[in-house]
Image (cartoon, grey):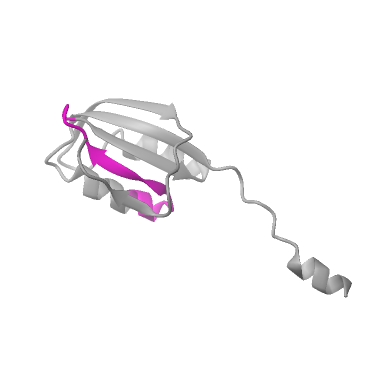
Amino acid sequence: MNAIATAATPSPMPPSAKTLRVVVKGRVQGVFFRDWTVQTARELGLNGWVRNRRDGSVEALFSGDPTAVDEMVERRCRVGPPAAVVTALSAFPSEDDPGQGFQRKPTV
């Protein structure tokens, strides 16, 4: 009976997720930045979204394992896909719900 109770006990919670909202500026529209971001974030197992902004920047929300979020923001997004030229990147902690998976959202 004790084994059944143990089997029903939830497994330990994974490490706390980290969520960052990021704005990337430079030549980041028209260079497949959003599609590259979706593919790269999915490879890293992140949840969230990416979208173009009317001011020419790209905005994204990344959530997941803190190491993977840092890799995406600090290493990958600072460079972007081959045709991109990133001139600035701002990252802010966020409490927004990233949803499940990673998707491309419409321009705002």
Which of the 4 image quadrants contains residue 58?
Answer: top left
Residue 63, by quadrant, is top left
- Residue 83, how many percent across, how many down? 14, 40
Q: Is residue 51 magenta?
A: yes
In the picture, the quarter occupied by the N terminus is: bottom right
Q: How many marks?
A: 0
Looking at the image, is 11 positioned above or below residue 52?
below
The reply to whether the magenta stretch includes residue 35 is no
Could you say where residue 64 lies in the image, as x and y percent from the top left? 49, 46
Asked where in the image residue 62 lies, by quadrant, the reply is: top left
Relative to 7, is 102 on the left or the right?
Answer: left
Image quarter where the C terminus lies is top left
For the record, the magenta segment spans 40-56
| Residue in front for this viewpoint, 21 or 30 | 21
Image x and y of residue 32, in percent: 17, 46
Percent of width and height locating residue 105: 26, 46
Residue drawn at 21 percent across, 44 percent down: 106
The single residue placed furthest to the right in the displayed view is 2
Residue at the left extreme? 30
Residue shown at 35% from the left, 32% from the top? 22
Q: Is residue 9 left or right of residue 59?
A: right
Report the side of 108 relative to 19 (left or right). left
